Amino acid sequence: MRRQIPILITTIAGLVFAISYFIPHDPFGESESIFGDWITIVQAFAVWLGALNLLKISFEKISSKSADRHYAAIIIVSLIGTLAVGFYDGYSGMAQDPQVSFRDPGTNFDWLYRFIYTPLSATMFSMLAFFVASASYRAFRARNVQATLLLIAGFFVMGGRVPLFDMMISPITDFPVFSWFADWIMTYPNTAGQRAIMIGIALGIMSSSLRIILGIERSHIGGGSG
Amino acid sequence: MEMISIWIAAILTLGIFSFLYKDNPLYKACEALFVGVSAAYWAIVFYFDNIYKKFYEGAVTAEEPDYFLWIGAILGLLFLTRLVPKIGWVSRWPMALIVGATAGLWMVGYFVSNAMNQIGNTISNIIARDELTGAIAWGETFGTMVILVGVVSGLVYFFFSKEHKGVFGATAKVGTWFLMVTFGASFGYTVMSRMSLLIGRVDFLLGDWLGILR
Amino acid sequence: MLSTIAMILSAIVGLSLIYLLIRTIQGHPVERRIVFVYIGLAVVLPLLMNKTLPLPVTKDVRKLYDRLEQLQPGSKVLCAFDYDPPSAPELQPMAVAFLKYAFKKDFKIIIMGLWPQGPQQAQQAIEEAMLDPIIAGKNLVQGEDWVNLGFQSGNEFVIQSMGTEFKRMFPKDNRRIPYEDIPLLQNVVNFSNVDFVMNFSAGKPGTYEWVQFGVDRFGFELGAGNTAVQAPMMYPYLRAGQLKGLLGGMIGAAEFEKVLNEKGKASTFLLAQTFAHATVIIFIIIGNLAFFASRKKKTAGAR
């Protein structure tokens, strides 16, 4: 019951999607759509599982008087507060005529998105600019042929995709050497390398998928490889 | 109100940036706020765009209800059993559906798009011709050859069932050169991307907040 | 005034890098916070200069523009907004430029998102596009000229399901108007009823999924705007014709603005982007000069 049913579900779902690629007609076409509907709903519940789990962990931190309890309290208040605003805007918007979406400009939820969520998330990721620069200074060395190739490609791509370097050599030549070479690297060697990686990954995914569909790989249902 | 909103956004931005000096309580508070708000943001969007619009209005309040959607909702609820350790094993059922369906979809999708189409494009039209005159386009032909050599040698490098020695080893070595150039190009683009994100935030601080950018 | 001060400061900061080089070669690399200050200045000072640079348009951007130019007024274009605020500095300028162009050319725009934040970013892009006097003069109507279908969870499964029927994944639009009551969507059943698909993507799900589970299965034409991190991975698709054109990162956005003759955010950021690249390159050069100097010293010491 604990193992057999999940294996059966995995196999049936996998076969339906694989077969319907080649035979998009019923029963495979319709089954594929029905399964697709279920997956979209299950994923929505999965997100709620994440949010509820975050709440649970945060409450546990507070009750165990952990050192991080103050931050856990911020998480709880901000999570519940945002949920309350979202539900209020969502349902009150439905009651209006014409209906207003919770994400429409002017709603409280949109305000949270623009002035709380956006600055926090965008700044968090923008900090990577500092760390990538610091790492380049401290660790990016031409130690051998491979590292030198990496460095040269990076140098030409960084220098060639912006106009300054071609402007610097413009007294010598009108030909945009840097941008031409950056473009050449992207179009040919980069395509070759990316394609080799892509083909390798595709073959790997094929074999893994087959193992999952045939029930040989069971780690997702709490078992190892069979 | 607009001014207060911008000030709040600016304080939060500076709060996150304060980490660059060192880890501090303001940064941690902003981080916690980010975690809470973003988790709730996702939950609300998934609720209204999916659970409400797709399931509730499709299976419960619709004139012609789609009863199949109930199975999706039940599977979704089973996912929540993970919160209760004793019956958490039931959550493997919806997990099995997602993993199985993804495996089936990816198996063919990846093979067609990322293997067959890429191999086909690599080995076809190696001698490129000018579209107007029909003459051999030497530059493009050279580029196509570069791609052919790069793909073959790169794949040889990824083949670990045979020891990388002799001609095979030399080919694999050429493959690593191509991969290094690829990683270098990706590094260049990554720097470009990260700097763009920083420019976006600085533009907000100098423009929207301080108002010194025209 | 501010611009002149910024230029003078840039020159001073540039010269101070020589000191940094000497210190690093002497074996005293500067601590990371000093590097942070330089990066900060490399972004702040050029923004204050308020200058733009001439930029050549790459063939990948030109290809997209040429394909869009072939579309007739009234063409239906599906726009997938698959990104969030952290990627907005790169993708939002592309989206705004694209929407301005599309509205001016009288394309009918169908918006959707595989990322929860996507439709909200689209909403902001539309607001900005509507500020253009030419577009404002057209008095465009939501539901007739453009529609926001909102977000749907399910990643690639959404694309696969839309191949049969859009309505199945988006029974109502963002304002909860039923699919069949939206004038723009009359006669739009699936991908075969749209003339072009444009995807703004910051990762997964995004252009990868649109190519694999959309283009290669249902045969529509796809153009993409990607973050710079993702763009190099799209070149195989571009070469194989699975993508009709590619805008890569903020530079791609600036090129797109140039080819469309729209002065947008990306063009104004170009100088800052250039200075930032130059600073990283200089830091790499300094680091490597110090590396070679120390190696030389070690070799001489060993002798």
Image (cartoon, rainbow, N blue to C red):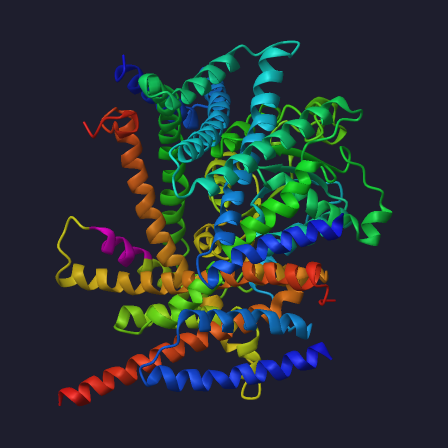
User: Looking at the image, which residue is at 45% across and 57% down?
Assistant: C232
In the depicted structure, whether residue A70 falls above or below residue B194:
above
How far across and how far down the image is residue A47, in percent?
A: 48, 30
Q: Main secondary structure of the magenta part?
A: helix
Q: Residue at x 15, y 58 (%)?
A: B164
Q: Residue at x 33, y 16 (%)?
A: B87
Give the total number of marks visible in the rendering. 0
Q: Picture coordinates of residue C102 (x, y %)? A: 72, 48
Residue C242 sits inside the magenta stretch:
no
Q: Is residue B158 magenta?
A: yes
Range shown magenta = B151-159
Residue C231 in view, yes or no: yes
Q: Quadrant of the C terminus of chain B?
A: bottom right
Q: Position of residue B121 (x, y in %)?
A: 41, 51
On screen, residue C118 above or below B187: above
- Observer-nearest of C3 and C114: C3
Which residue is at the front of the view, A8 or A77? Answer: A77
> In terms of image quadrants, where is residue C73?
top right
Q: Position of residue C184 (x, y in %)?
A: 74, 32
Vertical order, C254 against C73 (above or below)? below
Q: Nearer the viewer, residue C135 or C29?
A: C29
Residue at the spot 57% in from the left edge and 88% down from the top edge:
A171
Determine if residue C51 is in view. Answer: no
- Determine whether, in the image, residue A176 is placed left or right of residue B83: right
Question: Residue reaching furthest front?
Answer: A65
